[in-house]
Amino acid sequence: MTVSSVGAASGATVAKNDAQQLGQDQFLKLMLAQLKNQDPLKPLEPAEFLGQLAQFSTVTGIQQMKGAVSDMAGALRASQALQGATLVGRHIVAVADRVNFDGVSSIVGRIDPPASADTVDLVIKDASGAVVSRTTRPVVAGAVEFAWDGATDRGLRAPRGEYRIEALFTSGGRSESVPVQLESVVTSVALDPASGSISLETNHGPLGFAAVRRVK
């Protein structure tokens, strides 16, 4: 930061403080004028006067609190951006339901079914929604890890492209879905200036920062 920019920032801070102080001075002047010019036969009630003071204090406190929250949010966004930048080139395990199959590398991931689950069905669909692969795995203990090499139920090899992956666990004859955690590589990090959210670009597409479960 240059000397001129430091001076400009300092000037902006002083101007902001002066503007806040000016508002307080104006309020006090108005209150004094109100007391001076009040009707002697109808003086201002003490309760009303104190109520106006309390209202002004509340508004000032809210403005200060909003400024503090805004500063805190800015610091949090900066911290998340730095954390996201350290993930570039790293392997992560994140919740996702879409994969980009390159026709060569296997799709690797894991599923955390509930303890009551008996089996887990891993279902892979193509862009049209047609099922290309469905495998059933028993749930022994802990997470169920999987790897799909592109083999279809017809004994063919799936072409490269985007696929949707789902996991359904069966318990007591009932089937319910459970999130799938896919392993991917982070290629870049993007920060949305409007919302402040962080997006991780991976070989399987964009992922939210909150979707990350593990970093390898």
Image (cartoon, rainbow, N blue to C red):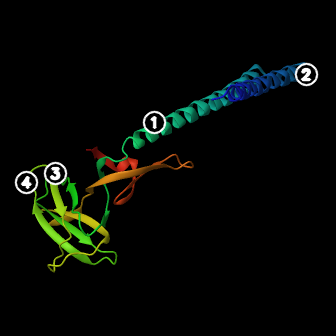
Q: Secondary structure at mark 3?
A: loop
Residue 32: tell me if it is visible.
yes
The three-letter code of the residue at mark 4 reads Val
Q: Secondary structure at mark 1?
A: helix
**Residue 95 percent coordinates (x, y):** 31, 54
Q: Residue furthest bottom?
A: 154
**Residue 112 in the image: above or below residue 9:** below
The three-letter code of the residue at mark 1 reads Ser
Please state, as top left, top right, bottom left or bottom right, where the N terminus lies in the image. top right
Given residues 209 and 90, the one toward you in this image is 90
**Residue 132 in the image: above or below residue 165:** below
| Lower sequence index among marks 1 and 2 | 2
The three-letter code of the residue at mark 3 reads Ala
Residues under labels 3 and 1: Cα distance? Answer: 31 Å
The three-letter code of the residue at mark 2 reads Leu
Asked whether the beta carbons under mark 4 and mark 2 sit within 8 Å of each other, the answer is: no
Identify residue for label 3.
143
Identify residue for label 1.
79
Asked whether the beta carbons under mark 1 and mark 2 sit within 8 Å of each other, the answer is: no
Bin the neighbour count of mark 1 within 10 Å (Cα to Cα): few under 14, some 14-19, many 20 and up.
few
| Lower sequence index among marks 3 and 1 | 1
- Residue 140: mark: 4
Residue 43: tell me if it is visible.
no
Which dot, 3 or 1, sits closer to the camera?
A: 1
Residues under labels 3 and 4: Cα distance? Answer: 9 Å
Please state, as top left, top right, bottom left or bottom right, where the C terminus lies in the image. top left
Residues under labels 2 and 3: Cα distance? Answer: 81 Å
**Residue 105 percent coordinates (x, y):** 23, 63
| Lower sequence index among marks 4 and 2 | 2
**Residue 28 percent coordinates (x, y):** 80, 21
Identify residue for label 2.
41
